[in-house]
Image (cartoon, rainbow, N blue to C red):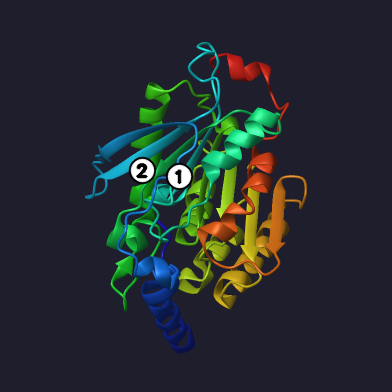
Amino acid sequence: MLKLRTPTRRELLLTILLSCLVVFKFDSDLASSPAHLQSNPRPLSHTLTGDIRLHKNFHSRFLSRDRDIIVYLPPGYEKQQTRRYPVLYMQDGQNIFDAATSFFAGMERHLDEKAQALIVRGAIRPLIIVGIYSTGPDRINEYTPTRIPVMNKGGQADLYGRMLVEEIKPFIDAQYRTLPKASNTGVGGSSLGGLLTVYLGLKYPNTFGKLAVSSPACYWDNEIVVRYVHSLPAKTRQRIWLAVGTAEPDVFLSGTRSLHSALVAKGWKDGVDLGYMEATGAQHNPEAWSERVDRLLTFLFPSGQRKQQDRYVE
């Protein structure tokens, strides 16, 4: 677990202000819902595409709350019984496929529609996408690597990582025909989920070879995740997608730029093993993130990559 240092008075005040911003506005993620949807009592229609499986109430011995896991299977999964597939593990699973379950009312990331279309066109490798639901008020605790004493929140990312690596991934590998090695396994998330992705992805380079990072909350604990990148003994062999919108609050834009600079300084190269994008005018919500899904998937899972391996056990 990352260790806290004693902050300066200025850093402490900044942390309090930013943390209040996180809890009460941006990372509560409810304030971003359109007003007409918040006031509309009618249930939203489901927007799922493709072969979707739901595993209810997954229990972990590391974290107290059970959570649902939703799985997208690529076209041909049932027909091609000998074929195995790479996997992308996404945080905030209720937001990635279905507008009816998203905590941004009426908004979702469209990973199912985007992946389906790209696979059918042959633009990416067929893959399995696993969405791990977040757990409401515990989200900020589970998705952050350090605890903020003045908030009494945060610091369970290491436990979440053990759940993901020791429980969820083995469950998915047992239930579905996966390619389990790091070179075929990605982890992703947005906002606090993006912060978690960077931290756990770099902590487990032998488990996750691909990181999908959208609008990460790098400001947490005085950009501790940026300092974590600087502290790495050496660059890993991981492939990283990193993106942010220019119309997002400055704490996200400036923090993402700091993270990008840290990755480049450590040895990642833009356009080679680091895909970086600043989307002009894009805001901090799933619809904005969905506009970049095509680029994310084609950078991390390009077509033609190790096609033969997809057919056999690693």
Image quadrant where residue 215 sits: bottom right
* Numbered label attached to residue 267: none
Reading the image, the residue beneath label 2 is: 162
Q: Nearer the viewer, residue 102 or 277?
A: 102
Q: Nearer the viewer, residue 122 or 179?
A: 122
Q: Nearer the viewer, residue 37 or 209?
A: 37
Residue 166 can be seen, yes or no = no
Q: Is residue 283 left or right of residue 172?
A: right
Dot 2 amino acid type: Arg
Q: Is residue 35 above or below residue 159?
A: below
The kind of secondary structure element at disc 1 is loop
| Image coords of residue 263 (percent x, y) | 67, 57
Reading the image, the residue beneath label 1 is: 47
| Image coords of residue 119 (percent x, y) | 64, 31
Residue 116 can be seen, yes or no = yes
Q: Is residue 303 above or below residue 191?
A: above
Q: Earlier in the sequence, mark 1 or mark 2?
A: 1
Dot 1 amino acid type: Thr
Neighbours of disc 1 within 10 Å: few (<14), some (14-19), many (20+): some
The kind of secondary structure element at disc 2 is helix
Q: Quadrant of the N terminus?
A: bottom left
The residue sitting at 64% across, 53% down in the picture is: 292
Q: Quadrant of the C terminus?
A: top right
Q: Is residue 142 above or below residue 36?
A: above
| Image coords of residue 149 (percent x, y) | 31, 74
